[in-house]
Image: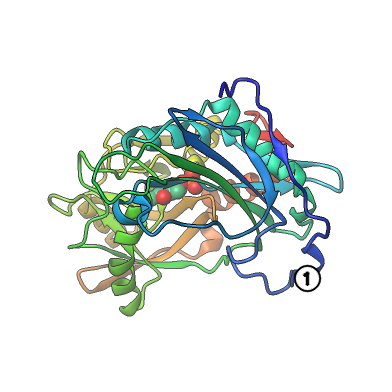
Amino acid sequence: MDLTELRLKVDKVTDSAISKVDWVNLPFGKVFTDHMLMMDFVDGCWQEPQILPFQSIPMHPAMSSIHYGQAIFEGLKAYRHNTEKVSIFRPDMNAKRFNESAKRMCMPQIPESAFIEMVRKIVEIDQAWVSEIKGYSLYIRPFMFATDHWVGIKPSETYKFMILLSPVASYYSELVRVKIEPYFTRAAKGGVGRAKAAGNYGASLYPAKFAQDQGYHQLVWTDASEHKYIEESGTMNILFIIDDVIITPTEDEDTILRGVTKRSILDLARYWGIQVEERKISVEEVINAAKNGRLQDAFGAGTAATLAQIALIGYEGTDYHLPPVETREISNKLKSYLSLLKIGQSEDIFGWNFPV
Ligand SMILES: *Cc1c(COP(=O)(O)O)cnc(C)c1O
């Protein structure tokens, strides 16, 4: 099918489940909206997408994605501005990244405009689920997986693309304790670290649990060959502020996921005249800066929490504490500006909000 002019089949629920939601105790990613979107790739082309009541999907036990991991996903959010208005934050960036992930995993691409339109349509149908409560949003999960019924290793010929929506509360804003990882690896050069491929997350669980058992929330990934350079923090990008300069690992290496939140933070910081350096950053540089009081700030960036400030960094058995959060002017300002921008309360200078 030609996706340039998107036609959608819509089958709506008769009774919405929204009145059953416990908004006060809303767990992350466990509650889903009334509808979901589904589109099949068969005979070399995408079929007509459908929006249908949220439901389980039948699965053949030899479905190739559960054996060999041809599966990718995205994560983005919709926010409520007021009673009438809802917008989605930078879906164009997710559309682009989804296709980059698809390419790396030998999966079919989706025209960016069709991806954005499908996201927009499903959010529009379930827009009542975008809560007005402060800090709440609607998490959007587009994903694609291989559906051939065959336990042979080759790229699948059939795929399913889906979008789920999940209302989420404000992410905990507790400061995070991180540990610099001296052994385990998230991504190696030439690998799939740049793709939002399902297997990357399965592989990260064991090292993350190991760090958690040692009293940290998350680990900081280092390069696969020497463990000397900083890459990411958990499932977030990482940024440091040393001598008033924001420093973050360069995306030139294919071991780093190109985050939309980080890109937005850097664009905003540069616009405000803050110096930004995207380059290799060694563990030694960060630890030395922490030792002599020049490490002003460190924070993770990602859609779930937007900006997660770091309390301390553990390395070789020592915990290096960062300055009190009240003194972290730059990250505090970035965090509040971005949060307000997403709900239409600070000026959208770059045109990042896509109206629904
Ligand atoms: C999704 C993700 C991020 C953050 O990307 P955003 O687009 O900002 O949400 C960073 N690192 C990894 C490994 C990720 O999977």
Q: How many marks?
A: 1
Q: On the picture, is 223 further left or further right than 313?
A: left
Quadrant holding the C terminus: top right
The residue that appears at 61% across and 32% down in the rendered structure is 48
Note whether residue 175 is visible: yes
Colouring: rainbow
Please identify the residue farthest to the right as the structure is shown. 83
Which residue is drawn at the image coordinates 23% and 43% (left, top)? 191
Rendering quarter of residue 133: bottom right
- Residue 349's place in the image compared with 172, above or below, is above
Where is residue 7 shown, x and y percent of the image? 68, 28
Q: Which sits in the foreground, 134 or 38?
A: 38
- Residue 187: percent from left, percent from top: 25, 49
Question: For mark 1, does the 10 Å Cα neighbourhood hold few (<14), some (14 to 19), or many (20 or more) residues?
Answer: few
Picture coordinates of residue 291, whole percent (x, y): 27, 62
Work out whether residue 232 or residue 37 is closer to the camera in this orientation and state it.
37
Of residue 312 and residue 100, the one placed in the foreground of this image is 100
Q: Is 39 drawn above or below residue 229 in the view shown? A: above
> Is residue 148 toward the left or the right of residue 135 in the image?
left
Q: Tell me which residue sits at (21%, 49%) in the image.
A: 223
Inspect the image, locate mark 1, and give the three-letter code of the amino acid beneath it.
Lys
* Secondary structure under the numbered disc 1 in the rendered image: helix
State whether residue 225 is above or below residue 49.
below
State the residue position of label 1.
Answer: 20
| Residue 344 seen from this side | no
Q: Quadrant of the N terminus?
A: top right
